[in-house]
Every structure is written in structure tokens, then in C-alpha cells.
Image: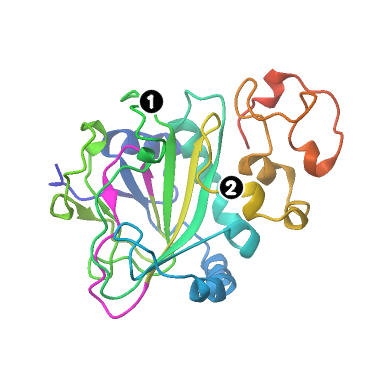
């Protein structure tokens, strides 16, 4: 299954092309997608939070791995990656069968030296192992390389094409290939593909920015309304707030009190809106 390497495309690739690779392979790398200045600011803003994050408490989370969340609140630069237009365009096309999609989680994953490979898994198992139809995608995930990703330092490992396999917890890292990529590149992968963090056999920390999206009718993994304090949320533009979940996620999911747009909780009254209008996909 892992006989082929993960395909790489240029940042000028069309969203349809990238979406097609995702559907076929389950993963694709867009080389050199991030602005170097954005990455530099993001690393500087998040450094104290990463240093203060405790290591994981079990094998899955990683005893030498730090998972630092709340990126929107902690790193203004990260908001540019969260809203990267090409990533959102690909996500919209992959999750096109749902009326809308929203931010699922934001975190950095810093894998320290000596960390063994993470158990191979599917991210969509987070939804209580619900057996989603094989042709219905509910997640589009990104892993941004904040440092170079190499096989030696724990690059994310993928079983290409595995989105079509049945659920199983028996897959191992031996079946995978590493998503090696340079700093600023972005790995996109679906919620169905089997993957896991690689073993870090180097003497340096491997840091990735894990930003994921989910259809609007599923619960978000990271609670954006509490991760991002109200005083920060009030400074954000409406499109980012909607992407975070301040919107109705489908025909009638997530409204507040008297059938009002949840964005009004931050902005105040903004006029009458129908359910159909509230269900539009984020821009």
C-alpha cells in the first residue's frame, strides 16, 4: 500500500488538482506555500507557549511531544495560515457535500528527540469511530512545516491510498512513507487516511502546525469559543469568526436564542437572516 511516495505539487497548482490527489492518495504536499516572514513571526509568537506546554501523558500523545493549541489567540501570524486561500479552496472542494465547514483544531506539534513513532490511526475516529460512508469526507487536515520535515526527525508518516481500507488498529509504521518537506511547505491529508507522527531519531525538535477543518454539522475538536477569549474574538474580522464557528453550521445547527446568527454574540444585532443565508460556506 505504501509503495509510492507522497506526491508534491507547486503552490501554483489548481485547487481541483490538489483535491483530486487527496481523493486518490489521501495526502499531498504543497511545496513552499507559506510566506517565510509569516512563519518567522509565528515561531517567535508561539515559542514561549510551546516551551510551557507539558509533554503528552500517553504513547499516542507522545511522552516527548508537546501539543500547543489556541493558535488564533496566541499567534496573530498563525491566522494567515488558518485562512490561507488555497487551503480553504481545496477544503471547500473536498468537503463539498456538506453545506458548510469550520475550523476543527489549531495546534503545533513539537516532537522531541527520542520520541518513537506514533500509533497509526485515522483522524475521523475522533467522532466516536462513526463509520462515515467511504465517499463522504468530513475532514481536511493540514500540517505546516515550521521546521524541515525529514524521515530522521519524525516527519508525519502516511499510508498512501489507505482511505479506502476498512477500519483497523493493526497498521504499523512499516507500512508508511514519510511526508518529507522543507520549512514552509504544507501537507494536506484527509480524515480517512492512515497516518501518524514519525519517530524522531535526530537531536533536534521537529515542529509542525496542525490546522484542520471539519464539516459544519460535526463538533469541533478544539473549542474555539473558549480557546479564543472574547476580548480577542472581538478584534477578529467576521470571516475568521465564521470560520471559527460563529455561524450556523448547516440548515439549523448552532443558532443562538431567538434563531439569531451566532456572530451577533460578538457583534450585536446585524439584521434578519434566514436559515438558508446562515448556511453559506465560509469565504
- Of callouts 1 and 2, which one flags the residue occurring earlier in the amino acid sequence? 1
Q: Is mark 1 on a helix, strand or loop?
A: loop
Q: Is residue 239 magenta?
A: no
Residue 125, position as x, y percentages in the image: 35, 39
Residue drawn at x 47%, y 46% as measured from the top left = 212
Check disc 1 and report the residue beneath it: 136
Residue drawn at x 71%, y 28% as measured from the top left = 255
Find the distance from the CA under tag 1 to the CA under tag 2: 24 Å
Q: Tell us which disc is closer to us: 1 or 2.
A: 2
Residue 114, position as x, y percentages in the image: 25, 74
Q: In which quarter of the image is residue 247?
A: top right
Left-right relation of 15 to 201:
right
Q: Which mark is residue 223?
A: 2
Q: Is residue 75 visible?
A: no
Q: Camera-side residue: 43 or 56?
A: 56
Q: Residues within 10 Å of mark 2 (few under 14, many from 20)?
A: some
- The quadrant of the picture occupied by the C terminus is top right
Q: Residue 53 carries which label?
A: none
Taking the view exactly as shown, the residue that stands out farthest to the front is 57
Q: In which quarter of the image is residue 186?
A: bottom left
Residue 234, position as x, y percentages in the image: 78, 52
Residue drawn at x 31%, y 56% as measured from the top left = 60
Q: In which quarter of the image is residue 117?
A: bottom left
Q: Can residue 87 be seen in this view?
A: yes
Q: Is residue 161 above or below residue 97?
A: below
Residue range highlighted in magenta: 188-205
Residue 18, position as x, y percentages in the image: 38, 40
Q: Are the two marked residues, 1 and 2, in contact with CB atoms closer than 8 angstroms?
A: no
Q: In this view, does 111 lie above or below 134?
A: below
Amino acid at each position: 500500500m505504501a509503495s509510492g511516495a507522497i506526491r508534491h505539487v507547486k503552490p501554483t497548482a489548481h485547487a481541483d488538482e490538489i483535491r483530486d490527489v487527496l481523493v486518490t492518495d489521501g495526502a499531498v504536499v504543497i511545496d513552499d506555500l507559506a510566506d517565510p516572514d509569516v512563519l518567522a513571526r509565528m515561531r517567535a509568537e508561539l515559542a514561549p507557549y510551546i516551551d510551557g506546554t507539558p509533554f503528552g501523558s500517553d504513547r499516542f500523545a507522545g511522552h516527548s511531544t508537546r501539543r500547543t493549541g489556541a493558535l488564533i489567540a496566541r499567534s496573530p501570524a498563525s491566522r494567515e495560515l488558518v485562512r490561507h486561500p488555497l487551503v480553504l479552496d481545496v477544503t471547500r472542494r473536498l468537503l463539498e457535500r456538506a453545506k458548510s465547514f469550520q475550523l476543527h483544531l489549531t495546534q503545533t506539534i513539537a516532537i522531541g528527540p527520542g520520541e518513537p513513532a506514533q500509533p497509526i490511526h485515522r483522524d475521523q475516529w475522533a467522532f466516536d469511530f462513526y463509520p462515515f460512508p467511504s465517499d463522504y469526507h468530513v475532514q481536511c487536515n493540514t500540517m505546516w512545516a515550521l521546521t524541515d520535515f525529514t524521515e530522521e526527525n519524525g516527519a508525519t508518516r502516511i499510508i498512501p491510498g489507505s482511505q479506502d481500507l476498512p477500519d483497523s488498529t493493526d497498521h504499523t509504521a512499516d507500512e508508511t512513507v514519510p511526508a518529507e518537506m522543507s520549512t514552509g511547505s504544507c501537507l494536506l491529508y484527509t480524515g480517512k487516511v492512515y497516518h501518524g507522527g514519525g519517530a524522531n531519531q535526530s537531536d533536534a525538535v521537529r515542529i509542525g502546525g496542525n490546522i484542520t477543518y471539519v464539516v459544519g454539522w460535526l463538533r469541533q475538536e478544539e473549542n474555539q469559543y473558549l480557546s479564543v477569549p472574547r476580548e480577542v474574538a472581538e478584534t477578529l474580522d467576521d470571516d475568521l469568526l465564521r470560520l471559527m464557528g460563529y455561524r450556523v453550521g448547516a440548515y439549523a445547527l448552532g443558532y443562538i436564542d431567538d434563531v439569531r446568527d451566532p456572530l451577533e454574540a460578538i457583534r450585536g444585532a446585524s439584521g434578519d437572516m434566514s436559515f438558508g443565508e446562515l448556511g453559506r460556506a465560509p469565504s
